[in-house]
Amino acid sequence: MVEIERKFLVKNDSFKAAAFAKNRIAQGYLNSNPERTVRVRIKADKGYLTIKGKSNETGMSRFEWEKEIPVGEAKSLLQLCEKGAIDKTRYEVKVGKHVYEVDEFYGENEGLIVAEIELQSETENFEKPDWLGQEVTNDKRYYNSNLSLNPYTNWQ
């Protein structure tokens, strides 16, 4: 139940041609406290409830618990969420033996594209495609829970 993940900015949209899956995602936060975020998500035709703990010092590892819930229940829970819903398309791109999840954001986070890769350990090696940019793993501004409160378009 520990997620190990690294996060990067994306330099261009060349990843789209290599994507094997693409899904629109709507998500909101019932609780955006960094100690324990509680997220509701609708991805394609499925609902999810996710609880995440505080990240460790590197920003790579944290507790994560997720359960699929009926999409109708997820829609109802989204109505209870804090302001700042997240709207994005997630592309899944296989690179070597890993899959990058690349999120293209809309609305108040328009213009932001972030890639995440889940790893088995914090020191695991992985291939970096040419569209991968600066690492932002430990930059809390790029956490979706923070993007819901302080959107990317407000950073200028």
Image (cartoon, grey):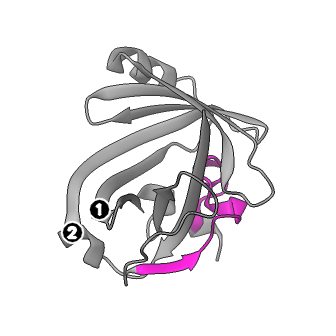
Residue at x-position 61% and y-position 61%: 142
The magenta segment is 132-152
Q: Nearer the viewer, residue 127 or 78?
A: 127
Near-viewer residue (80 or 139)? 139
* Circle 2 residues within 10 Å: few <14, some 14–19, many ≥20: few
Distance from Cα at disc 2 to Cα at disc 1: 8 Å
Q: In the rendered image, which quarter contains the N terminus?
A: top right
Indicate the position of residue 31 as horizontal and vertical percent values: 68, 31
User: Please, is residue 129 above or below residue 100 in the view?
Assistant: below
Q: Quadrant of residue 141?
A: bottom right
Q: Is residue 105 visible?
A: no
Residue contact between numbered discs 2 and 1, judged by CB atoms under 8 Å: yes
Is 2 placed above or below 115 here? above
Q: Secondary structure at mark 1?
A: strand
Q: Quadrant of residue 63?
A: top right
Residue type at the position of mark 1: Lys
**Mark sitting on residue 18:** 2
Identify residue for label 1: 94
Residue 147 falls within the magenta-colored stretch: yes
- State yes or no: residue 60 in magenta: no
**Residue 85 in view of the camera:** yes
* The C terminus: image quadrant: bottom right
Q: Amino acid at mark 2?
A: Ala
Reply above or below: 98 against 128.
above
Q: Residue at x 44, y 27 (%)?
A: 48
